[in-house]
Image: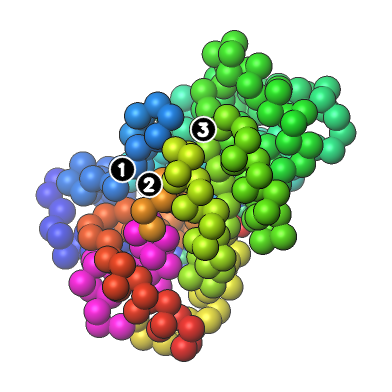
Amino acid sequence: MKISRREMLKISAGAGAGLLLSELPALSQQQPQLMRTIPSSGEMIPAVGLGSARTFNVGPPNPEWVPLGDVVRLFHEMGGRFFDTAPSYGTSEQVAGQIAQELRIQNDLFFATKISTGGGRQAGIDQQEESFRNWGRDRIDLNQVHNLRDTDIHLRTIRQSKKESRTRYVGVTTSFGRQYEQMEQVLRTEELDFVQVNYSLGEREAAERLLPLAQDRGLAVVVNEPFNVGRLFGEARGRELPDWAAEFDCRSWGQFFLKYILAHPAVTVVIPATGDPEHLVDNMGAGIGRLPDERTRRRMEALFDDL
Ligand SMILES: NC(=O)c1ccc[n+]([C@@H]2O[C@H](COP(=O)([O-])OP(=O)(O)OC[C@H]3O[C@@H](n4cnc5c(N)ncnc54)[C@H](OP(=O)(O)O)[C@@H]3O)[C@@H](O)[C@H]2O)c1
């Protein structure tokens, strides 16, 4: 089956996606996803990942699992790999793990999870074990200390797991500006592979010091809350995408917000969350085609600030 570039762009814009969803495997073979390198290993990874904080927290099997199954399947078929979750996201880690196992892709995805407990060392170890079980895996790709909670304690647990070859990469996360100073200190003093931080057109503070520091320290950077927890769509509601967005192959506001982030030189992976298969297809389109240059990024900021 041959799919034209026009049809491809139509799908990646989200328009008419329902009609063409079944054709996506063929499509992904024609349009490679943007890849980035993990500095500590040289491993290449697709730059558009998938978050799961609220979207996969839907409880035991019920009809809400159906679109989520499509989201995970399409993500994989379109070349996505990096899946971010946490044991503290309600049922998200279990739901995603079960869907991935039903699709038999649990070992194909890059499984990124977290230790998120203030309950001490054993509680962290227990959470880590639960993550292995939730995804039916004997290896976690990336485990992260969530929101710098008990960083010292949980870094020891994750490093031990790495030593035993049960975890591949070690990381830390935040999504709070008030933790940036503490995060800078952690990045300067700890040996890490990844840092995860919030950064978007609506929250640009991380670009001032954290992102350059992460780059200097040779860390892979994961960007969370790329739509500022969906608020950016509210800002753009009713506004036309500017004509010049076509200059960097951008067909929707979702791609506008994601391409802005992906064009930052420190960024390795961005993890938009969605429970909607059409939005997933839209978001994956951000990993296809050109990215804005630095001058255009300034123009994007000015336009966003005027919305
Ligand atoms: N400290 C930490 O470690 C930390 C903190 C925060 C977040 N995270 C991670 O980062 C992930 C992303 O952050 P987030 O979930 O807070 O928020 P987000 O990705 O900034 O925004 C998600 C919202 O955007 C909507 N959306 C997604 N794609 C869209 C599209 N193409 N068009 C229109 N609406 C769209 C989603 O609704 P639909 O479902 O309707 O698409 C959802 O309401 C989390 O899920 C989590 O994995 C980590």
Q: Which disc number belongs to residue 292?
A: none
What type is the residue that disc 1 sits on? Met
Quarter, ligand 1: bottom right
State the image coordinates of residue 143 (x, y, percent, origin top left). 60, 31
Please indicate whether residue 150 sits to the left or right of residue 80 in the image. right
Mark 3 is surrounded, within 10 Å at the Cα level, by few (under 14), some (14 to 19) or many (20 or more) other residues, namely many
- Residue 251 forms part of the magenta stretch: yes
Which label is found at residue 35? Answer: 1
Q: Is mark 2 within 8 Å of ligand 1?
A: no
Mark 2 packing: few (<14 Cα in 10 Å), some, or many (20+)?
Answer: many
Find disc 3 in the rendering and name its residue.
Answer: 193
Foreground: disc 1 or disc 3: 3
Amino acid type at circle 3 is Asp
Mark 1 residue crowding within 10 angstroms, few (<14) / some (14–19) / many (20+): some
N-terminal of the pair, mark 3 or mark 2, is: 2
Q: Residue furthest top?
A: 164
Distance Cα–Cα, label 3 vs label 2 = 16 Å
Q: Main secondary structure of the magenta part?
A: helix
Mark 1 vs mark 3, CA separation in Å: 17 Å
Residue at image coords 27%, 66%: 293
Q: Nearer the viewer, residue 233 or 305?
A: 305
The residue stretch that appears in magenta:
242-263
